Amino acid sequence: MATKIQTSASDATHTPVKKFRVPDLLWDAYETVCKRELGRDRSEDLVEHIRAVVREHGTAAELELLDQAEAELEARRARKGGRPRKDAAE
C-alpha cells in the first residue's frame, strides 16, 4: 500500500508521515495486540515507544528535541481543540 508522504512544508498542521518496512502479517498482529492489550492503536504505541527510548538513552540535546516535539504536539492539539480517540466517536 502506498502512503502519501507529507513534508513539513506541505501542511504544518499535521504530523509528517514516516515510512518504515515491516511484513504485513507482523503489522496486522501488532495492530490486534495493541488494541487488545494496550487499548491504543499502533501509531500511539510506536510514538510512546520512541518517547521512552529517547527518555532512557537520549543525550541532553536529544531530550531537548523531545521536549520541543511534545510542545509542538500540544500546540497542534490545542489549535484543533484536542483530538478525541477514534473509538470515543464510535
Image: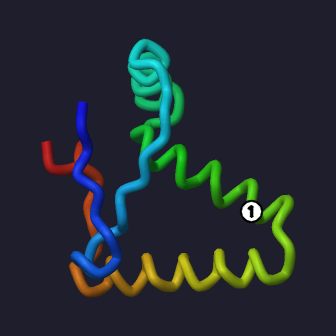
How does the figure colour the protein chain or chains? rainbow
Q: Which residue is mark 1?
A: 54
Q: Position of residue 68 (x, y in %)?
A: 58, 85
In the rendered image, the vertical position of residue 32 relative to residue 40, given as above or below: above
Q: Amino acid at mark 1?
A: Val
Taking the view exactly as shown, the residue that stands out farthest to the top is 25
Residue at image position (41%, 30%) is 35
Left or right: 46, with 72 as reference point:
right
Quadrant of res 64:
bottom right
SS for tag 1? Answer: helix
Pinpoint residue 23: horizontal percent, then vertical percent.
Answer: 46, 19
Q: Tell me if 89 is positioned left or right of 34 in this view.
A: left
Name the quadrant of the N terminus.
Answer: top left
Say which of 58 and 89 sits in front. Answer: 58
Residue 77, given in percent of the width and then of the height, sits at 33, 77
At x 35%, y 68%, the residue is 15
Q: Quadrant of residue 62?
A: bottom right
Q: Residues within 10 Å of mark 1 (few under 14, many from 20)?
A: some
Residue 86 at x, y percent in the picture: 23, 48
Name the residue at 46% across, 83% down. Answer: 72
Instruction: In the rendered view, tell whether residue 52 sits above or below residue 69.
Output: above
At x 15% / y 50%, what residue is drawn? 89
Residue 34 left/right relative to 87 = right
Q: Is residue 30 above or below residue 56?
A: above
Foreground residue, 39 or 24? 24
